[in-house]
């Protein structure tokens, strides 16, 4: 997919029709990758949606936990 997007004259058109994603395979792979992350990086990724200091590290705006649930 990466090579196709990089070679395309209009990559956005390719992104409008993505192939089917196999959820079980994707979840399994993500769980494998998460175990390889250093502890501090994992903590930052978990906290960045609602922790202002962590969000700033990623250049994002934090939202409250209540707002995140809406």
Image: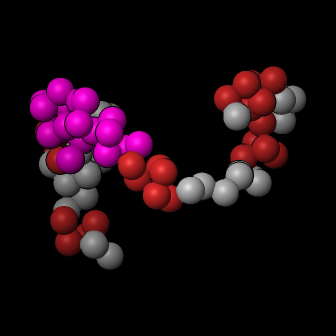
Q: Which residues are magenta?
A: 29-46
24 displayed left or right of 2: left
The correct choice, above or below, for 5 with respect to 62 in the image is above
> Of all residues shown, which one is farthest toward the right?
9
Q: Quadrant of residue 57?
A: top left
Q: Is residue 56 visible?
A: no
Q: Position of residue 41 (x, y in %)?
A: 20, 31
- Quadrant in which the N terminus appears: top right
Determine whether 64 is above or below 51 in the image. Answer: below
Which residue lies at the image location 32% right of the left edge and 39% below the top edge? 32
- Can residue 61 be seen here? The reply is yes
Relative side of 40 to 33, left or right? left
Q: Residue at x 40, y 52 (%)?
A: 27
Total numbered badges shown on the rendered structure:
0
The chosen color scheme is secondary structure
**In x, y percent, where is residue 53?**
14, 39
Magenta part, dominant SS: helix
Instruction: From this view, report whether residue 40 is shown above or below residue 64.
Output: above
Indicate the position of residue 19 as horizontal and vertical percent values: 71, 52
Task: Using the image as rendered, state which of residue 6 and residue 23 is in the foreground.
Answer: 23
Tell whether position 31 is magenta.
yes
Image quadrant where one finds the C terminus:
bottom left
- Is residue 39 a member of the stretch shown in magenta? yes
Q: Residue at x 77, y 30 (%)?
A: 4
Q: Is residue 67 above or below residue 30?
A: below
Residue closer to the observer: 24 or 16: 24
């Amino acid at each position: 997919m990466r090579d196709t997007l990089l070679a395309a004259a209009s990559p956005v058109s390719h992104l409008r029709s993505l192939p089917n994603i196999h959820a079980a395979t994707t979840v399994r792979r993500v769980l494998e990758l998460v175990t390889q992350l250093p502890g501090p990086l994992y903590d930052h990724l978990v906290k960045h949606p609602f922790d202002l200091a962590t969000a700033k590290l990623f250049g994002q705006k934090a939202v409250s936990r209540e707002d995140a649930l809406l």
